[in-house]
Amino acid sequence: MTIRRALSMLPIAVGMVCLTAWIVLPNTPPIADFEVQAGSDGTETSVRFDASPSRDSDGIIVTYQWLFGDGTTGSGATKEHTYPAVSAFVVTLVVTDNHGASHLTSRTINLSQPLATPATAPRPQTVAAPAAAANVPVGTHVGARAPEFALPDFGDSIVRLSDFLGQVVLLEFWSSGCSACVASLPYLESLRLAYGDRGFVVLDVATNRDYREAANLLAKGGYTEFISVREVDATSKETATAYGVVRIPHAFLIDRTGVVRFNGHLSYLRKDTIEAWL
């Protein structure tokens, strides 16, 4: 092909590229919805949750995350759960589609009132909470959506930040070799005790070269209710780097939709800031 011939075809090629870009449509977030039925064992505290009414207009839902309102969670389109008491609980469902967009909905169930059986279960009214901030730019500044990560816990199970959509997360980067980090642990525990029953979790990322030292320190101190994970590579510390962490301890408060509401040293995080997002 001559140079003149190639140049004559250039406008056509450019036009094809522009046309392709023009017809690409933005992703529409899914809609979370669920039904509540009596559980299969017939007890008052057994409940079956069904997320099949959830829908996605331009894709498919790939994950279903349940927060049962009693401090426990689950996953899957359908789930049976046994509650510790006959009481009222706020149940939250978070769904995520194949493009990463999420939506959550919450509803209060009262176990002192009869639940529908699977054969006669009516479609319940739902009260939708705000959608997760799928269309907010990712970043670490206040108002941005916190970067996703998947890190191993001390038992090598994978923990993702998105596992906690629907909860308020206090994310802290620390090391057992950092005296200021160790000094902050009692305060972290006091926050967990104060707000844990309101959907608040402490997620700590150990940056130790040997994560077992961090695990032993937490165990000896009785800090066993934190969600504790570790950097995959303790030398490069890729997660801490992605969050712009230069010095530890460094904390982030992340709201129920995955948006950063505080970025800084834990000592500057006020309780009224936490309470505003619970």
Image: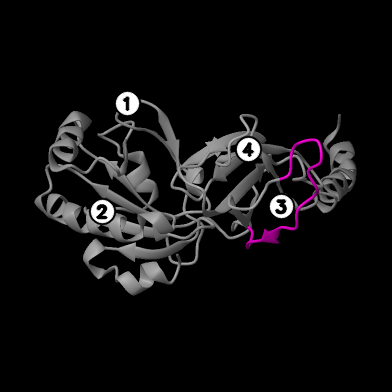
Looking at marks 1 and 2 on the same chain, the residue that comes earlier in the sequence is marked by: 1
Q: Are marks 1 and 2 in contact (CB under 8 Å)?
A: no
Mark linked to residue 220: none
In this figure, which residue is indicated by the disc labeled 1? 155
Dot in front, 3 or 2: 3
Q: Nearer the viewer, mark 1 or mark 2?
A: 1
183 or 98: which is nearer to us? 183
Q: Earlier in the sequence, mark 1 or mark 4?
A: 4
Magenta segment includes 74: no
- At a point 51% along the width and 45% down the height, the residue shown is 162
Distance from disc 3 to disc 2, alpha carbons, whole Å, reads 34 Å
- The answer for how far apart the CA atoms under marks 3 and 1 are is 34 Å
- Check disc 4 and report the residue beneath it: 63
In the rendered structure, the answer to whether residue 201 lies left or right of residue 146 reads left
Disc 3 residue crowd, few under 14, some 14–19, many 20+, Cα 10 Å: many
Residue holding disc 3: 29
**Within-10-Å neighbours for mark 1: few <14, some 14–19, many 20+:** few
Query: Mark 4 or mark 3, which is nearer to you?
Result: 4
Seen from this angle, which residue lies furthest left? 179
Q: Main secondary structure of the magenta part?
A: loop
Question: Regarding mark 1 in the picture, which secondary structure is present there?
Answer: loop
Q: Secondary structure at mark 4?
A: strand
Circles 4 and 3, Cβ within 8 Å, touching? The answer is no
Q: Amino acid at mark 4?
A: Thr
Give the CA separation, mark 1 to mark 2: 27 Å
- The span shown in magenta is 116-131
